[in-house]
């Protein structure tokens, strides 16, 4: 799925605006130079005339031998004269060169039929924005992965969780899977969820991330106002991966339970992966939600348990100790 049609159009519009802005600046610079340097406008017309003649001959196939060399020499001499005049009047010699944000694709977004690296980077930015994860992904990614706060069984479980997370990423296109991260507060559930989401966004997949309380509030608001966006049912966000973080933190109600079941059912029928994280253990999930919801989660999700101390507190303690040591 990746970019939506609207997102793709925004990126193409971005390149159109970029080329228009650069062209306006090029014209402004040329006008500035022609006003400040006597005779420069005549040189520009001479360059344009020679370039046009070269192009005409190429089209007609008669730009050969001596004539071709003479045209090339004429263009080179005119360019050297213009560069000299620019430098003598305080301008950089490349002041009138085409302005390009990306010289590789010349601000088109494509090299031949293939997306340019700048198009890929822009797509990733759009996907990050739509995922609600842009800020989190700056720190919650595999580059910041650390095993320093785990020991014994906790370390073993976390290492296995990392392996299964990376497997989920590598198999994402070919294998339909869902993940359930559960365990005590601050043990890395959201961190690994963000790591997965960030890597999939880099690969061009669309991700929607919601905290459970925010998600069900949004659904309730849409229901009250009879609005909604995303799927054809107009209820849930449509995306390659849906992340529901901190399940169990939402206000428990018949509405939230009903919507959760509908969500699980719809994603399952469409074979669209989900990741759920929760501070509840499996008995706690079963107690909080109906048996049919627990059955769906238990049968359709790979359960990954994490344990240990709250890493956020452990980091603060470590920072405090380092500050005392350096005082």
Image: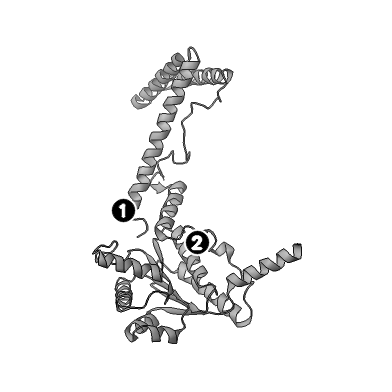
Could you classify mark 1 by the number of other residues whose Cα lies within 10 Å: few (under 14), some (14-19), or many (20 or more)?
A: few
Residue in view at x 39 percent, y 70 percent: 213
Asked whether, in this view, residue 85 is left or right of residue 250, the answer is right
**Image coordinates for residue 157, horizontal then vertical, percent:** 56, 79
**Image coordinates for residue 163, horizontal then vertical, percent:** 53, 73
Asked whether, in this view, residue 270 is left or right of residue 107, the answer is left
The residue where tag 1 is placed is 5
Numbered mark located on residue 136 in the image: 2
Numbered mark located on residue 143 in the image: none
Badge nearest the viewer, 1 or 2: 2
Residue in view at x 28 percent, y 65 percent: 222
**Quadrant showing the N terminus:** bottom left
Indicate whether 31 appears above or below 224: above
- Badge 1 element: helix
Residue 141 can be seen, yes or no: yes
Residue 90 position by quadrant = top right
Indicate whether 76 appears above or below 38: below
**Quadrant showing the C terminus:** bottom right
Asked whether, in this view, residue 158 is left or right of residue 47, the answer is right
**Image coordinates for residue 188, horizontal then vertical, percent:** 54, 72
- Badge 2 element: helix
- Of residues 236 and 197, which is closer to you in this image? 236
Residue 64 position by quadrant = top left
């Amino acid at each position: 799925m990746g970019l939506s049609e609207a997102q793709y159009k925004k990126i193409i519009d971005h390149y159109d605006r970029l080329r228009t802005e650069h062209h306006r600046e090029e014209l402004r610079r040329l006008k500035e130079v022609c006003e400040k340097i006597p005779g420069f406008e005549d040189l520009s017309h001479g360059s344009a005339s020679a370039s046009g003649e070269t192009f005409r001959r190429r089209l007609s196939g008669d730009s050969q031998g001596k004539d071709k060399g003479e045209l090339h020499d004429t263009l080179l001499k005119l360019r050297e004269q213009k560069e000299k005049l620019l430098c003598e009047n305080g301008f950089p010699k490349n002041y009138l060169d085409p302005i390009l944000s990306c010289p590789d694709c010349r601000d088109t977004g494509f090299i031949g039929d293939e997306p340019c690296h700048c198009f890929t980077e822009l797509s990733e930015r759009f996907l990050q924005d739509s995922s609600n994860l842009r800020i989190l992904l700056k720190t919650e990614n595999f580059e910041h992965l650390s095993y320093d706060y785990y020991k014994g069984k906790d370390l073993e479980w976390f290492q296995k969780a990392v392996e299964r997370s990376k497997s989920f990423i590598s198999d994402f296109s070919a294998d339909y899977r869902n993940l359930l991260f559960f365990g005590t507060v601050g043990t890395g559930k959201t961190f690994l969820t963000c790591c997965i989401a960030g890597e999939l966004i880099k690969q061009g997949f669309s991700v929607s991330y919601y905290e459970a309380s925010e998600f069900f509030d949004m659904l309730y608001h849409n229901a009250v106002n009879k609005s909604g966006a995303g799927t054809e049912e107009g209820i849930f966000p449509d995306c390659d991966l849906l992340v529901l973080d901190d399940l169990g933190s939402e206000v428990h109600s018949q509405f939230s339970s009903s919507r959760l079941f509908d969500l699980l059912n719809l994603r399952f029928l469409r074979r669209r992966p989900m990741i759920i994280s929760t501070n509840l253990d499996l008995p706690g999930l079963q107690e909080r939600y109906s048996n049919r919801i627990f059955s769906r989660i238990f049968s359709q999700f790979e359960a990954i348990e994490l344990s240990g101390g709250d890493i956020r507190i452990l980091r603060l303690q470590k920072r405090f100790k380092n500050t005392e040591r350096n005082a």
